[in-house]
Each structure stands twice: as C-alpha cells, then as structure tokens.
Image (cartoon, helix red, strand yellow):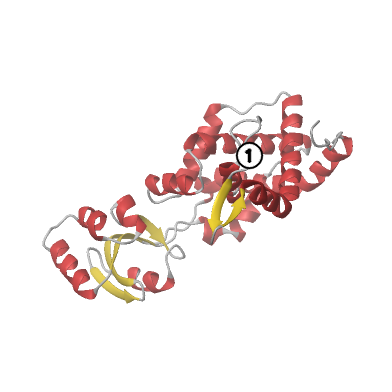
C-alpha cells in the first residue's frame, strides 16, 4: 500500500452513509476539514493512482480469464526468498509494520505479482535459454557471488562515557542484547538487541562500514558521531565466495524472467487497454 493511500484511508468514512465533515485539526482556531484533506489528496495523487488500479484490474481479469493459478506453495517460496534477504526475520516484520502492512497482506501482494508474471510469460511466450543464462552469469558473476560479510552487533548511546562503560561490561561477559534493548537509542537496539546479523559492503553507512570490515572477531570499537557514540562488536567474519553457475542458475533464471516480464508489461497493458471498455462514472451513479 502506498503511504498516501494508508494516510487517505485514515480519513475515509466507515460507511457510505452520511457522516459529518469532521474537523481533522485546528490551527490557531481555524479548522482543516476532512473533505479538504481528501480533496487535496485526490488532486495530487488520485488520477495517477486510478490509472494504476485500472491496469491492475485489467491484468487480474486477464489472468482469471486464462484459468491460470498461483498456488500457496509458490507464494510461500517467494516470500521465504524475500525474508531470507534480511539479516533477521524481525527486521523484515518491522519493515512491513512501518509500511502499514502485515504478512498476510504481503503474501497477497506477492500472489498478485506472481499472477502477473505467469500471465506475461504465457501471453508473450517469455523464456530464458541456456545461452542467455551463461551470458548473464559471466556479466553478473561478481554480484551473484557471496560478498565478504561481518556479523555485526551495534548500539547507539548519547555519551562516550556511557559507551565505554557498556563496552567494559560486554568484555566482562554482560549480555550485549539485553544492554542494547535497555540502553541503545537506535531502533534496532529495541527490535533485535542490536544484532544486525551478517552484513555485506554497501549495507551500512560508510563511516560504520569502514570500521566494521577492519575489525577482528569479538573486537569492540567506539565511533563518535553527531548523534552520539556507536558501539560496534564484530562477532564473526566471512570471506567473499565466488558464484558457482550450478548453484545460482535457478535464481538467475527467475531474475532474467522477471526482467523480461517488466520489459513486456507496458506493451501488454496497452493491448489490454485497447480492447477494454473503461467507462468513467458520474458522481452519484
């Protein structure tokens, strides 16, 4: 769900029955009314969103008319792959919550994505042959490999004195996660006990990344910033592992198919639009 749609939903009436045009907020005694907010949102985002919804409905109708199906197992497999890209499942769940979603809603979105992919693959006869796979593997060998990674724990506190005190406790055996949940002012402290899991280059802010990848196992470092003091601990390190064609072949095929689907989608939607009857409805009908 787009952020503005979630915002819009908060102001929508609970039913189609008449409801007072309530005051959303007052500024120095002057009200801003619900109808004003909705009108502004519609003018700014409505037409574009309506076009997106028409396209989505046309694709859904085309999918259903072809008697295609997306199985729960296919949805679970795609969700598992996406969840696996996060260092910690709790971070994945937190991201869903931040966007006003849930696991069930996300699965519905994944099912919709898979249905569009199946539709385009069938209608446009999309496929990936062995030659394309090998060519793509050579071109993307570096990104397909497993990059160097460090298992990092982190907390952010307000002062150097507090950071040094916490570091001393951890070196004496104190529970890092418990301290992070209690003391860290970074969101990940409360969420995961400050455990980032294994992170690769490009996933951290540059100032933290430089230090994190230079650390030894179990080493603790303090890093001053404008927001406070970062306390970092490297639990483990993994060297980069080159990609092996046989191991990445299936994922690479899926990646190339998705790229072909994306490229074919605009023309396919144009064809659907030309054959469809889209009738704007007058207000009140």
Classify mark 1: helix, strand or loop. Answer: helix
Relative placement, left or right, of 63 versus 106 is right
Quick check: 189 above or below 72?
below
Q: Residue furthest left?
A: 172
Asked whether residue 195 is in view, the answer is no
Give the answer, above or below, for where 270 lies relative to 14.
below
Above or below, 166 against 197 in this view is below
Q: Residue at x 61, y 29 (%)?
A: 70
Q: Is residue 229 left or right of residue 165?
A: right
53 or 132: which is nearer to us?
53
- Residue 189 percent location from the top left of the image: 30, 56
Q: Is 268 on the left-hand or right-hand side of 21?
A: right
Give the image location of residue 191, x and y in percent: 33, 51
Front one among 2 and 80: 2
Instruction: Report the front residue among 39 and 242.
Output: 39
Examine the rendering and report whether any part of residue 5 can be seen: yes
Image quadrant where residue 180 sits: bottom left
Q: Residue furthest front?
A: 29
Q: Is residue 56 above or below residue 3?
A: above
State the residue at coordinates (52%, 48%). 248
Q: If the image is split into quadrants, where does the N terminus sit?
A: top right
Query: Percent position (x, y) of residue 84?
Result: 44, 45
Quarter of the image for residue 127 reads top right
Locate the C terminus by quadrant: top right
What residue did someone put label 1 on? Answer: 113
As drawn, is 25 to the left or to the right of 181? right
10 Å crowding of disc 1: few (<14), some (14-19), many (20+) = some
Instruction: Point out residue 260 in the picture as x, y percentages from the top left corner.
Output: 71, 47
């Amino acid at each position: 769900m787009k952020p503005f749609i979630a915002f819009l939903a908060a102001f929508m009436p609970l039913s189609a029955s008449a409801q007072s045009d309530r005051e959303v907020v007052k500024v120095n005694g002057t009200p801003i009314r619900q109808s004003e907010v909705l009108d502004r949102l519609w003018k700014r985002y409505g037409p574009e969103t309506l076009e997106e919804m028409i396209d989505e409905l046309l694709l859904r109708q085309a999918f259903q008319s072809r008697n295609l199906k997306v199985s729960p197992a296919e949805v679970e497999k795609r969700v598992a792959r996406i969840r696996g890209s996060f260092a910690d499942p709790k971070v994945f769940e937190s991201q869903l919550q931040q966007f006003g979603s849930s696991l069930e809603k996300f699965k519905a979105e994944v099912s919709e994505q898979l249905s569009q992919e199946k539709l385009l693959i069938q209608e446009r006869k999309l496929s990936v042959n062995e030659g394309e796979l090998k060519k793509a593997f050579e071109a993307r060998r570096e990104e397909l490999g497993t990059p160097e990674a460090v298992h990092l724990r982190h907390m952010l506190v307000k002062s150097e004195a507090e950071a040094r005190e916490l570091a001393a406790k951890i070196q004496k055996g104190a529970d890092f996660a418990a301290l992070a949940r209690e003391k860290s002012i970074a969101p990940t402290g409360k969420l995961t006990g400050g455990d980032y899991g294994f992170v690769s280059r490009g996933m951290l802010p540059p100032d933290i990344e430089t230090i994190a990848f230079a650390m030894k196992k179990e080493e603790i470092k303090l890093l001053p910033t404008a927001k406070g003091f970062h306390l970092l601990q490297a639990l483990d390190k993994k060297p980069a592992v080159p990609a092996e064609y046989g191991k990445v072949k299936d994922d690479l095929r899926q990646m190339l198919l998705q790229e072909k689907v994306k490229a074919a989608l605009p023309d396919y939607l144009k064809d659907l639009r030309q054959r469809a009857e889209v009738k704007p409805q007058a207000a009140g009908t």
